[in-house]
Image: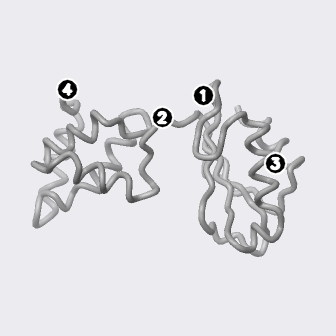
Amino acid sequence: MALPQTITSELDALVTHYPDRRAALIPALHRCQEQLGGWLSPQTLEDLAAYFGLEPVEVFGVAFFYPMFRLRPRGRHLVSVCHNVSCSLRGAEQLLEHVCKVTGAPVGGTSPDGRFSVVRVECQGACANAPMLDLDGTFHEDLDPERAERILRSAP
């Protein structure tokens, strides 16, 4: 299998902006993730390795290292719960537990219906209003489990 021609064309243009072709790997990973279903399949990683003339292990290593790359399909909605000090002191663990119960998704996984993926994240900069969660890019702060449940149930 090979990368779709539309992506290959974009990558051909992208690599011209870098002194070394392989320096475009991270932007290429982002582009593939955006265009190929929101995650990076093992086949996509192998195809990128072939495109860049790298060993597959090199591309897999980069994709596994950076938390912004998803290596499994994710749900329609992404729920990120902060767990740093402020959030933890104000109930983040209980909030995360309740989020998992409401969505049916384990931490780091996706609900059986494919609706939600839940992740534990580092500081989101909302420490003064902890605990918080991010639902599809929208911060919700000063949460308790009941309010979080209402927010999640209102997701389309």
Give x and y (percent) for residue 126.
Answer: 70, 69
Give the residue type that dot 4 points to: Met
Real-space CA distance between mark 4 and mark 3, rounded to the nearest whole angstrom: 42 Å
Real-space CA distance between mark 2 and mark 4, rounded to the nearest whole angstrom: 19 Å
User: Crowding near pointer 2: few (<14 within 10 Å), some, many (20+)?
Assistant: some
Closer to the chain start, of discs 1 and 3, is 1
Q: Which mark is residue 102?
A: none
Give the residue type that dot 3 points to: Ala
Q: Residue drawn 15% across and 64% down? A: 18
Closer to the chain start, of discs 1 and 4, is 4
Q: Quadrant of the C terminus?
A: top right
Secondary structure beneath label 2:
loop
Q: Is residue 38 above or below residue 15?
A: above
Pointer 1: what residue?
114
Real-space CA distance between mark 1 and mark 4, rounded to the nearest whole angstrom: 26 Å
Q: Marks 2 and 3: in contact by CB < 8 Å? A: no
Secondary structure beneath label 4:
loop
Q: Marks 3 and 1: in contact by CB < 8 Å? A: no
Q: Residue drawn 42% across and 33% down? A: 37
Secondary structure beneath label 3:
helix
Q: Which mark is residue 73?
A: 2
Real-space CA distance between mark 1 and mark 3, rounded to the nearest whole angstrom: 19 Å
Q: Which mark is residue 148?
A: 3
Give x and y (percent) for residue 141.
Answer: 78, 61
Q: Is residue 87 above or below residue 79?
A: below
Give the residue type that dot 1 points to: Gly
Q: Residue 12 or 99: which is nearer the viewer? A: 99
